[in-house]
């Protein structure tokens, strides 16, 4: 087992972190010089010290990230992850260098062993509309009668500071260009901008929602389940958002303007100038949507059993999320309590 030192208490305090990865044991700092690897959370500023320490001590660095089926609610609201990623080569959203996910996608002989599980998991995810965060209600359809008959184009905004934007070769101008192309390429369609969940909840700012002065588009700011929304649109424009991959699972046309991990495999309309270089450098080949799913959700992400806290599978997490979503949907809305004494109000 590889002993891995982390320099962030937030990482060492992740619930059941040592049960996600059977071959890794995490410890806070490296006080006894026992660690033979260092880990940090992606490219956050908090990893600078950890990366420096790894270089100085000639230790491998492992990048940690949330999995694609993360939790019931937002991490910022205190919900612990149910899936995590530990990449010893790079990280999936950094297009500058290879990642373990890229290697998995190209390992056809390994992927074929898990295609049946992938097929079953995809159906469960689509039918139950499971996504990274699963707190939001389902979208029930567009109500603006004027646009009901029009084709619907969804432009996905992201948060300022999102590492996948920076390391996916994009910036503010990329989002503005994407919106401009979406409008011009779909003159008879209704164009919607979907804001990020963290923007809706007031935690962060969006690239487009912070600079929106175009009256020809409609800002969609409701906090709703992403997959339920994607089911109601015809075409999706993204920079690097994972919603682009979820749109592919639904069979939607997806146009990418950044370099997300799922671009360049023959499934998306890719507009970034560097997409060809990924193919020339043997970092992309042809792949099917089920192969991308198998590599990313089945093999790349690691899971715990939410009921036991022990090592689990994607189906442990899927079944748990389905159950919790049903319970949450039953309890949505307001509850009025009448006639309680004053001292009981705080308890309630």
Image (cartoon, grey):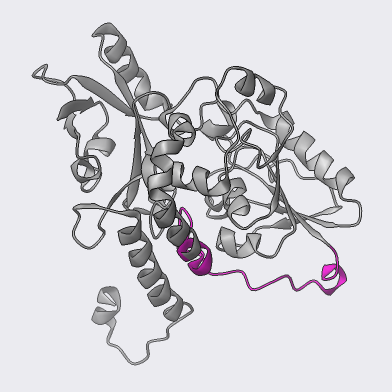
Residue depicted at x 65% and y 58%: 221
Relative side of 303 to 244, left or right: left
**Quadrant location of the C terminus?**
bottom left
Residue 178, percent across and down?
76, 38
| Any part of residue 161 in sight | no
Magenta range: 124-150
What residue occupies the far left of the structure in this picture?
A: 32
What residue occupies the far right of the structure in this picture?
A: 187
* 283, above or below 136, in the image: above
How many numbered circles does the render carry? 0
Residue 260, percent across and down?
58, 35
* Quadrant of residue 73 within the rendered picture: bottom left
* 48, above or below 347, in the image: above
In the image, residue 126 lies in the stretch drawn in magenta: yes
Q: Nearer the viewer, residue 243 or 101?
A: 101
* Quadrant of residue 167 within the rendered picture: top right
Residue depicted at x 66% and y 38%: 266
Residue depicted at x 32% and y 52%: 82
In the image, residue 133 lies in the stretch drawn in magenta: yes
| Any part of residue 8 in sight | yes
């Amino acid at each position: 087992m590889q002993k891995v030192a982390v320099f962030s208490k937030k990482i060492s305090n992740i619930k059941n972190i040592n049960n996600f990865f059977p071959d890794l044991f995490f410890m806070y700092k490296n006080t006894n010089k026992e660690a033979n690897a260092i880990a940090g959370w992606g490219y956050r500023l908090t990893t600078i010290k950890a990366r420096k320490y790894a270089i100085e001590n000639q230790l491998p660095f492992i990048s940690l990230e949330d999995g694609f089926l993360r939790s019931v609610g937002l991490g910022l609201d205190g919900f612990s992850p149910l899936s995590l990623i530990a990449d010893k080569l790079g990280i999936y959203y950094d297009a500058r260098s290879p990642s373990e996910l890229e290697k998995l996608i190209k390992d056809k002989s390994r992927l074929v062993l898990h295609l049946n599980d992938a097929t079953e998991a995809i159906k469960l995810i689509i039918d139950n509309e499971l996504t990274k965060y699963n707190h939001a209600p389902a979208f029930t359809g567009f109500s603006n009668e004027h646009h009901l008959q029009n084709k619907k184009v969804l432009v996905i905004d992201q948060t300022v500071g999102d590492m996948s934007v920076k390391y996916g070769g994009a910036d503010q101008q990329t989002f503005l260009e994407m919106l401009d192309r979406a409008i011009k390429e779909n003159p008879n369609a209704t164009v919607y901008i979907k804001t990020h969940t963290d923007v809706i909840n007031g935690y962060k700012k969006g690239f487009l929602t912070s600079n929106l002065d175009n009256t020809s588009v409609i800002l969609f700011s409701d906090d709703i389940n992403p997959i339920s929304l994607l089911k109601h649109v015809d075409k999706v424009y993204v920079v690097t958002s994972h919603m682009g991959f979820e749109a592919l699972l639904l069979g939607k046309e997806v146009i990418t303007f950044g370099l997300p991990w799922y671009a360049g495999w023959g499934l998306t309309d890719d507009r970034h100038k560097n997409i060809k270089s990924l193919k020339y450098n043997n970092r992309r080949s042809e792949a099917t949507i089920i192969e991308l799913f198998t590599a990313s959700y089945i093999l790349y992400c690691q899971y715990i059993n939410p009921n036991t806290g022990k090592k689990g599978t994607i189906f442990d997490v899927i079944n748990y999320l389905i159950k919790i979503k049903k319970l949450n949907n039953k309890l949505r809305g307001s509850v009025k309590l009448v006639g309680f004494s004053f001292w009981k109000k705080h308890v309630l």
